[in-house]
Amino acid sequence: MSITPSLSYLKSFFFCGLCFKKMDIQNEAFFCHSGCFKGLSAVELEEILWDELGKFLSHASQRTAAAEKLKEKLSAKQIRLLFKSLKGFVGFLPVEDKERFMNSLVEKVEITSSNSINIVFRF
């Protein structure tokens, strides 16, 4: 079964923190080809990722750096809207904008256990 298009943008970011291989997504769940992890909900991981990004951007200096990174990919109006209500806005954000946002700010997400992830930001 294929993944929901709204979650497909996440595929390039998730890596196994144990074997360091890129994780894959199937049936809306992430898994490691080496067998380290399987069945990690893509929906829950997306929610965690955006929540952590919101916390990261709650600091003025990090928002400024993020805005500099994003201005190449999103308009100033889009950036303001994202920063104003990141958590509430994400659900309505088109997949293409989610992908541009993540590609600009997130290097990778390492899953080190079923309860622990490490987000590597680009700045």
Image: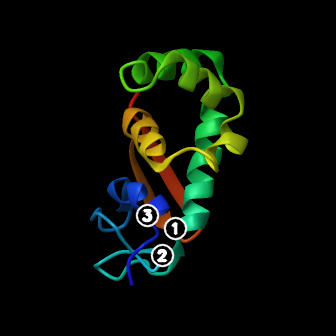
Quadrant of image for the N terminus: bottom left
Q: Nearer the viewer, mark 3 or mark 2?
A: 3
Badge 1 density bin: few <14, some 14–19, many ≥20, Cα 10 Å? many
Comes first in the chain, label 3 or label 2: 3
Q: Amino acid at mark 1?
A: Ala
Residue 107 versus residue 36 in the image, above or below: above
Query: Is there CB contact under 8 Å for labels 2 and 1?
Result: yes
Distance Cα–Cα, label 1 vs label 3:
12 Å
Position of residue 46 in the picture relative to residue 88 (left or right): left
Picture coordinates of residue 71 (x, y %)? Answer: 42, 18
**In this rendering, which labeled residue sits more in front, label 1 or label 3?**
3
Q: Position of residue 32 (x, y in %)?
A: 35, 75
Using residue 88 as the reference point, say whether residue 98 is left or right of it: left
**Residue 64 vs residue 86: left or right?**
left
* Image position of 20 with respect to 70: above or below: below
At x 56%, y 50%, the residue is 49
Q: Position of residue 9 (x, y in %)?
A: 40, 54
Report the residue marked by disc 3.
5
Lower sequence index among marks 2 and 1: 2
| Mark 3 nearby-residue class (10 Å; few <14, some 14–19, many ≥20) | few
- Whether tag 3 and tag 2 are in contact, CB under 8 A, the answer is no
Instruction: Name the residue: 40% across, 38% down.
Output: 100
* Residue matched to label 1: 42
Instruction: Identify the element where label 2 is drawn.
Output: strand
Relative height, residue 41 to residue 88 (above, below): below
Dot placed on the residue nearer the N-terminal end, 1 or 3: 3
Please state which of residues 3 and 66 is positioned toward the viewer in this rendering.
3
Q: Position of residue 59 (x, y in %)?
A: 65, 22
For label 2, the residue is: 29
- The residue sitting at 40% across, 61% down in the picture is 8
